[in-house]
Amino acid sequence: MIDLLEYAVNIARELGASFAEARGEDSESTRIEVRDRVTKAISYGRIKGISVRVLYNGAWGFSATSILSKDSIKKAVIEAYKVAKKASEKVREPVRIIELPSVKDEVHSDVLVNPADVDPSEKVKDILELHNIAFSLGKEVLKTIRTDYMDMMVIDYYVSSEDRCIVQERCITWIRSWATGKLGAIMAVAREELGSTKGYVIFKKWSQERIAKRLLDIIKGQLEATTPKGGSFPAVLGPNVVGTFVHEAFGHLAEADLALSGSAIVDKIGKKIASDYVTIVDDPTIPDGFGTFKYDHEGVETRVAVLIEKGVVKGLMHNRETAARINATPTGNARAESYDVMPLIRMRNTIMEKGDYTVDELFEGIKFGYYLKSFRGGQANLDGTFQVGIQEAYEIVNGEVGRPVRNMSISGNTLETLMKVDAVAKDFELDYGRCGKGQMAFVSSGGPHVRVKSILVGGRS
Amino acid sequence: MNEVEILDVGKRVVDMSLKEGASEAEVYVCKVSRKSIVMYMGSIKMSQSVSENGIGIRAIVGRRVGFVYANQLNDLDRLISKAVAVARTSREDENWKGLPEPSEIPHVNGIYVKRLEEVTLEELVLKMYEGMRIMGEYKEIVPVAGEIRVDCLERAIVNSNGIELRSKETYSVAYLEVVARSKGYTTPVCLDMAFERTSIPNMEHIARSVCKKAVSCLKPERAISGKMPVILSPIALDELMEYTLCEAINAENVYHGRSYYVGKIGENVANENLTLEDNGILEGGFFTNKFDDEGVPHSKTLIIDRGILRSYIADTYYGRLLGMRSTGNATRIGGYKSLPKISPTNLVLRMPTEELDEIIHDVREGLLVEHVEGAHSSNPESGEFSVVAAPAWIVRNGELVATKRVMLSGNFYDILNRFELMSKEVRQVGHLIAGYVKISEVNVVA
């Protein structure tokens, strides 16, 4: 593979490209879908391919092929070069990029059990066990359960005209379960999404029993829950809600491509936008995080992107191009879903840093408020507003966690909400999920328990 | 690799799968070339071409179905044994009644042209420049985004029942999005697009149309709320239909009881003026082809005939479950990486027509809607929708006046009874071929 990539980069160099990079992918993946103890679908896929990206006079050309012959690669490079040249004739703002020193590196994945070596029948058996346990523990309430499972083992190859040559392995194992419960006329929905980068160890990390209990707890809570009062209340957010908030509501605003095209924080760098308790980073080094890797898909060494430090905006998440545009250090946030698409700025492990409080201290002194433990889904807009649905919430009455609350959502303005954070606990949890931005990326997010002076709570009928 | 070879690969893999222990096998082999130019904020942001081979194998052991895919056509031994292993791991599907049988394939025109297969990215850049030049002529216009895309697909479908088919197809799609800005006011994003099979869309035409639309959105007035006649553009109608009607006519949803049209064949479901046909062999249609993605011939299916529901659309599997033939609507949305699913081809809407100007002229107080947001939140089972209409214009005594975002809500299956008139000029937008449609009454919240 490396020979072919070097061949591609050399052709681009000879043609006169100012910069050229070639990426290769060799991956194997398995997907399984199980509904109510019935295996609905299993598929296996194997993908191999090469792409080349060429910069000429401030314009990009990109070409990809699955046909791994020198002829086909040469054709791809020439095509990318020619179109870059054509597009450069009318370029409004020529692209500049950060160039890096030469490097040769091989990064092996720390996978414990390679999922490609595990027979699909074993994976199916493990998922069926989850369903069996869920139905036996939840016979009174559980109506349906669906589990989607995916694993992939990928080798990424990278060669650039800067004489960088990188081979990096990565492994993703991911499951998501949706369960619905019903009691009388009340419906309840619970979801749980889990993952690992260490291979087929997912049910060792979380036993089937633990996952089933978790789903049923959420369902049972909703079934006996009251509905929320609308209005602004003090709230304690659990790590899962903090992670979602940090990713959805704040993180996207700090992706440099979106920020520079006018997100709510474009003119806030160096300014205080959150309370002193708030430090938010996108950290590619957290053990077993979906966004933990040494090099990104532009062959850049990943580094921690400090987004907010003690309330002040410190920086953005960059690729080579946005870093050059505002003279920042590239953070290694360029990720591509597969070899045949150009990398985009994506989050990795986006977290709020821990504070000094114990979790109990956060609840003290709240006469009436809400404890928002885990999220269902959410969306955020470029203008800085957000709406997050909560699947597991409780009342807080006189400093104690009280009755469960269902159909709850929180909304508001992201920056105003960050200003209202008045205590951050010293616990920490990391979650696993996927993020869509035209391409799908596996990301982690997380944080400690956090208290907000007031947050707008709305019910959902 | 040429066409003959992909068919040969298919035949060989079917044979090998049977030898490996499969009782039936189906192979989809393709050769894809995709070229695209993306414009963002007035500059060309991405120019890319991808050429890829792909193979998807459905191996069946008894009534167990396995699926595997790869984008390399060598090392097929390993893939085939994986396919059979996956099939053996899969559940026994008591509804499995076998792969489709061969049948006569229709002759269709206008699905491929060499000129599109051979188009270069540089030519597409020049086309995009044409659009950008027109946008530059309007001082209020800010280009937001746009894309020109040309795909060439060669596909072969071979199965162990004797289906051996191949086809070569070209597709081209383009869209442009702009806003107009004047005196501190920015209009909603205006969008226009075109879908072609044998030529590249005319970018000057799209640019002019979208710029004129955006400029006419300036100086908005406040709309009033209430029930009123609404004229939907084909773009808005396609968006609403995708998440409602298209789900209701899908045999998979009908079988699982998730369709509003369960048990309604022969019943009145729309205005008696309205006829809807799924026509997969329509000359010039964007989704026209000789056969679908499991090798069943494309056909013409009358879905609603003068208001009466006549048929669903189906693939082989769900067709059999509902006691109907496949209508040739099996589609692999993800190409070789996916199994066939039911999807419409070209949905042709027929209604009494008038010139759009006349339709507008006859409305005293109503709304004209070009585009809706949030159609995906519609409830396909009940038909309820609540969307933001933007851009939209108030129709006041037959004249158009720009307005800001308004909400439209209602039940799509209900309003089909109130589809009154359609403009004479029709076009294809996604799966839909229709004109502007006047609906006698929709709930508007300003």
Image (cartoon, coloured by chain):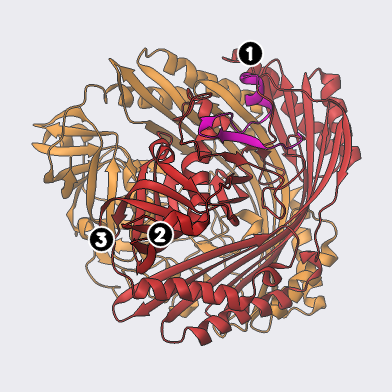
Q: Is residue B377 left or right of residue B160?
A: left
**Chain name for mark 2:** A
At label 1, the amino acid type is Glu
Where is residue A147? Give x, y as percent. 56, 70
As displayed, is residue A151 above or below residue B127?
Answer: below
As displayed, is residue A457 above or below residue A333?
Answer: below
- The dot on residue A89 is 1
Local SS, label 3 = helix
- For the residues labelled 1 and 3, say whether their Cβ atoms are less than 8 Å apart: no
Q: Who is closer to the viewer here, A369 or B64?
A: A369
- For the residues labelled 3 and 2, say whether their Cβ atoms are less than 8 Å apart: no
- The dot on residue B413 is 3
Q: Who is closer to the viewer here, A313 or B434?
A: A313
Can residue B289 be seen here? The reply is: yes
Mark in front: 2 vs 1: 2
Q: Who is closer to the viewer here, A346 or B352?
A: A346
> Could you confirm whether marks 2 and 1 are on the same chain?
yes
Span of residues in magenta: A300-327
> Could you confirm whether marks 1 and 3 are on the same chain?
no
Q: Residue at x 16, y 35 (%)?
A: B360
At label 2, the amino acid type is Tyr
Magenta highlight on residue A454: no
As displayed, is residue B369 above or below residue B160?
Answer: above
Return the residue at label 2.
A371
> Could you confirm whether marks 3 and 2 are on the same chain?
no
**Chain A shown in which color?**
red
**Chain name for mark 3:** B
User: Label 2 vs label 1: CA separation?
Assistant: 57 Å
Q: Is residue A323 left or right of residue A7?
A: left
**Chain B shown in which color?**
orange
